[in-house]
Amino acid sequence: MLTKAFLLYILNINSIGGKNLEIIIKNSSERPIYEQIYVQIKDMILTGVLSEGDMLPSIRGLAKDLRISVITTKRAYDELERDGFVNTVAGKGCFVAGTNRELIREENLKKIEVHMNEIRKLAKSCGITGETLIEMFRLLESEE
Amino acid sequence: MYAIEMNHVKKTYGAFAMNDLNLVLPMGCIMGLVGENGAGKTTAIELLMHAVKKEEGDIKILGVDNESTDFLQVKEEVGVVLDEPYFPEVLNAVNVNSIMKRTYKNWKEEEFFAYVEKFHIDKKKKFKDYSKGMKMKLSIAAALSHNPKLLILDEATSGLDPIAREELLDLFNEFTREEDHSVLISSHIISDLEKICDYVAFLHRGTLKFCEEKDMLHEIYGILHVGMKEAEDIPKEAVIGVRDNGYSREMLVKRDLMPKGFEVERAGIEDIILYMAKEGA
Amino acid sequence: MKGLLLKDWLTIQKQTKIYFVMMLVFLLIPSMFWYSIFLGSLVPVTVFAYDERSGWDKLARVMPYTSKEVVASKYIFGYLLIGGSAILGVIIQYLYSALRILPFSLQDGWRGYVILVCSALIVVAVNMPVMFWLGVEKMRIFLTFFSVAVMMIVGSSVSFELEYGNINFSLSSGVILAVLGISLVLQFISVKISEICYRHNMK
């Protein structure tokens, strides 16, 4: 009886609207598990793998399938909701929120900032000036 | 709503003392109870089911005080597996079914025999001729076959081979797919608990050292390897436990109290418990 | 409760078939039929010992049984065996008298029978609280000694009377009814004490 329920579960929920939901949990990772889920679902939303209105697996279902803690899964969903990526409809489930371009822009800006910081540190460590960096960037742009 | 609530529970047996035990298991979760032999795991479980009398405090199971008359009804909804097999030796699985059918109002005969089959238990064999694992499995089958909302398992996976243990862990994991199903499982096989639990409670010599969300443990604690000299720079309050090997020092530390710049590694639950048990000695 | 009785029955029937063989043999021997009535009073003690050994007594405390049920089931199990063997005893005695092996008539013998059954009941009433209080393990010698002593004293004297069809049984009907009354009252008191023992016996 249990196995049957389990199979149905995989068929219904693991693929959302024909899209395959892939979440990989690395127990050895330094990154907390809730963050791993958060990032992977967020990335799927931002890259368009998941689109507006798609239903996410239930917290309990996902936790049991991945054999991770329910609380951790809930935490990931809570953060996704707090950051506006998903909406929870009481009694129905959790749905991907409307794509907010502003939001994506914000996200990407943050990423760029992180990368630029890396570049700045690297450049500093070998004495490359800001001007040189800008030049390098212009060169890259013109090559495109 | 909580599946289990223990508040300020006290119990003493001669030299053994359990003082001020506070344990809360939210509905829908799995809690692992770990601790060395004699730490009080079995006592805690017996206290929960009112099989032994507490001296102080209060205990609620599925929201009902376990000394009230309503607790009889709650017992119908709790599946218990004790640490030692307990069916009369001469009985077989068929006998166990007929007895349980007259014991639990919600006894599901087909479900019981489905588990018996699934666990490859010989229905006609006497209980005393079962292997330790078989005895445990029959007990688990009985505990699962009366529509329980809460499973209380004392060392239910010890004495089983890794494949059988995995099979049972899967079963308990599936059991909590229902939102109002909860599990309390005690074990000294920490890796088993690490696989399925939402919460881990660590009992050491009658004292609850922590009762924490499993994944939070990894966020709170970490392992640090440093040289002896470097070790002096680490604030004392960050250090939970220390192990010297003569060349370097390994420590269990609280991540949030650590100064920046140290590379803190992930601490397994086993590490956390071993360090704490050693310090608490 | 039914579950507990069934468990006791299955356990005793499988674990010690010899008990029933013995009871039957005693029933068939005219001068020893009363042994089986007393054996009936000892069976619950044996079942209790098996419960302790298998750990069932611990399990019973986590299952939906009231302490009343746990205690009552043991008494009822004892009563069933005592009653069963007394009835079988009467039937067999009648058969013997019909076959002209021995003279028997309940009209003459009822006093002796009531005394036998009452003594077995008193054995139950004394043994049970001790058993629920201290357990069989510690008290086995006492329990057995007490039962056997009562059995020897009452059983042998009463059976002597019954066997020879002595109509003028030394006790009057009034006294015998009083004994019956007392043993029934004792049951009631004993059950209550056992319940208290069982509840307080919780570690």
Image: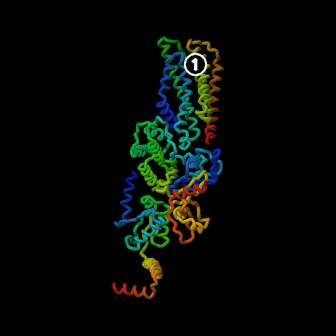
Asked whether residue B28 is in view, the answer is no
Q: Residues within 10 Å of mark 1 (few under 14, many from 20)?
A: some
Residue A7: where, in percent of width, then height?
37, 56
Relative vertical location of residue B162 with respect to residue B228 in this rendering, above or below: above
Asked whether residue C63 is in view, the answer is yes
Residue B173: where, in percent of width, then height?
45, 54
Which is nearer the eye, C177 or B281?
Answer: B281
**Quarter of the image that includes the C terminus of chain B:** bottom right
Relative vertical location of residue A66 with respect to residue A133 in this rendering, above or below: above
Residue reaching furthest front? B246
Identity of the residue drawn at 46% across and 47% down:
B144
Identity of the residue drawn at 55% across and 20% down:
C34
Identity of the residue drawn at 61% across and 24% down:
C119
Identity of the residue drawn at 63% across and 29% down:
C126
Q: Which residue is mark 1?
A: C110
* Kind of residue at badge 1: Trp
Which is nearer the eye, A81 or C143?
Answer: C143
